[in-house]
Amino acid sequence: MPDRLVIMCSTDFLWGAEVPEIASFLLRSGCEGLVISTEPPHYLPSLMHRSVLSALKDSLRNVDVPVAVRSPEVDTNVFSPNPHIANASIKSIEEAVKLAYLIDADFLVVRPSNKPIGDNPKIAARKLQSLMSKVTRHQYMAFELIGKRSELVVDELIDNRAGIIYVHGQSPEALLTHRKTVGVSLYVSEENYPRRVIPGMRGEIPYLLINPERRHLFRSDDFRRMLLRIKSWRNNFI
């Protein structure tokens, strides 16, 4: 079982608030890392005021925890056969790449599609590999892959800057043992959180990314109680 599983919290837990204030609250509440959302309409970088982006950069300048930027999930499908949809999806990912560079994030989290990978994993892998051309040689991109055929895509990703994040309940369990898997994403609520060890998890997976099951403005006390329960669950198998 993992000997180090850093809990990184999504800014989507305080949906609608200003990102610098959310980041500060999450760290004060005991989060061990941050996942900065770029979900529209509130957080797509091109829709945010320049002063907010500058304040976010300043607030993270001296933060000694891992920070990731997550590209938009809603209405995103890099694998779409419609080139207009695919290109718009890529453009939103590019915005997340630029934000990650601006704030010097440790890595990017990309959900390329909310639909399972289709009949040709090699084509899907080529599309993911092409996304790597959007990042600098110093940036790292971790893909949330869902659907049973996802495991067939991973070995096609030869770029060392590409990793995989297992999505609990949506990714094949084979990804938990893959050498490219760097994190596990959990989608939780005040009542719904892990109650058992995730079977088959490779020991050196470093990150546990917690996201809200539904984006909304959590009450401070509710969020803290939920985080304490997740830490207790995590500590049972570290």
Image: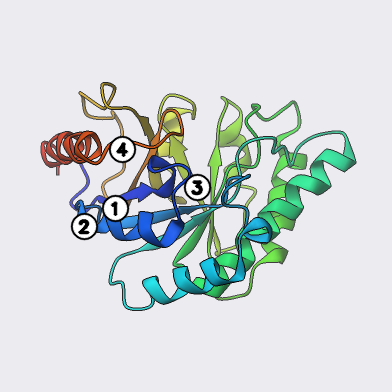
Find residue 26 and report its horizontal and vertical position in percent.
Answer: 29, 53
Q: CA distance from mark 2 to mark 1?
A: 6 Å
Q: CA distance from mark 3 to mark 1?
A: 24 Å
Quadrant (top left, top right, bottom left, bottom right) of the N terminus: top left
Residue hosting label 1: 26
First in sequence: mark 1 or mark 4? Answer: 1
Q: CA distance from mark 4 to mark 3?
A: 13 Å
Question: From the viewer's perspective, is the residue at label 3 or at label 1 nearer?
Answer: 1
Quadrant (top left, top right, bottom left, bottom right) of the C terminus: top left
Numbered tag placed on residue 233 in the rendering: none
Tell me what residue is drawn at x 50 percent, y 47 percent. Answer: 164
Q: Please, what is the three-letter code of the amino acid marked with disc 1? A: Leu
First in sequence: mark 4 or mark 3? Answer: 3
Comparing 52 with 101, the one in front is: 52
First in sequence: mark 2 or mark 4? Answer: 2
Q: Please, what is the three-letter code of the amino acid marked with disc 3? A: Ile
Tell me what residue is drawn at x 37 percent, y 59 percent. Answer: 21
Labels 3 and 1 touching (C-beta < 8 A): no
Left/right placement of residue 138 relative to residue 135 reads left
Residue hosting label 2: 28
Find residue 3 and report its horizontal and vertical position in percent.
Answer: 18, 51
Residue hosting label 4: 201
Question: From the viewer's perspective, is the residue at label 1 or at label 4 nearer?
Answer: 1
How many residues crowd around disc 4 within 10 Å: few (fewer than 14), some, or many (20 or more)?
many
Q: Please, what is the three-letter code of the amino acid marked with disc 4? A: Met
Tell me what residue is drawn at x 41 percent, y 62 percent. Answer: 20
Say whether residue 177 is visible. Answer: no
Labels 2 and 1 touching (C-beta < 8 A): yes
Comparing 36 with 79, the one in front is: 36
